[in-house]
Amino acid sequence: MKAYWIAHVDISDPEHYSQYTQRAPQAFAAFGAKFLARGGRSEALEGRATPQRSVVIEFDSYEKAVACYHSAAYQEAKRYREDWARAEIIIVEGIAPI
């Protein structure tokens, strides 16, 4: 079954954050990830206020999604995000096709 990263990100310094966005896609590509949503228009209907960016990334499996997060390539990219943005990232497994 497919799995998805769902991330909500608030950026405090877009210039420095761009160092992350230049590095992270290589980690995602190595695990066959596909962006389904990335920073487009959004609206919070319940819960916390709308984050600056919402991102949904699809992986072929839960294991690949988790492995990508823990990979050396992603952890290196993440270092460029941590001081310049606050992120909430969850991994959720998809449902079996009917």
Image (cartoon, rainbow, N blue to C red):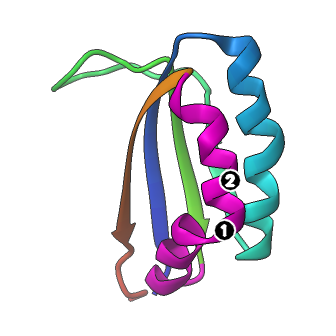
Q: Is residue 98 above or below residue 75?
A: below
Q: Position of residue 80 (x, y in %)?
A: 66, 35
Q: Position of residue 39 (x, y in %)?
A: 61, 28
Is 92 part of what is drawn in magenta? no
Query: In the rendered structure, are the residues bearing label 2 and label 1 in contact, judged by CB atoms less than 8 Å apart?
Result: yes
In terms of secondary structure, what is the magenta stretch mainly? Answer: helix
Circle 2 — which element?
helix
| Viewer-nearest residue: 44 or 81 | 81
From which residue to which does the magenta span run?
Answer: 60-83
Query: Rounded to the nearest whole Å, what is the CA distance between mark 2 and mark 1?
Result: 6 Å
What is the crowding at mark 1: few (fewer than 14 residues within 10 Å), some, or many (at least 20)? few
Q: Is residue 23 above or below residue 49?
A: below
The disc at residue 72 is 1
Circle 1 — which element?
helix
Looking at the image, which residue is at 47% across and 74% down? 66
Q: Is residue 64 above or below residue 12?
A: below
Q: Residue furthest left?
A: 47
The disc at residue 76 is 2
Looking at the image, which residue is at 44% across and 81% down? 62
| Viewer-nearest residue: 27 or 7 | 27
Is 61 part of what is drawn in magenta? yes
- Is 91 positioned to the left or the right of 81 in the image? left
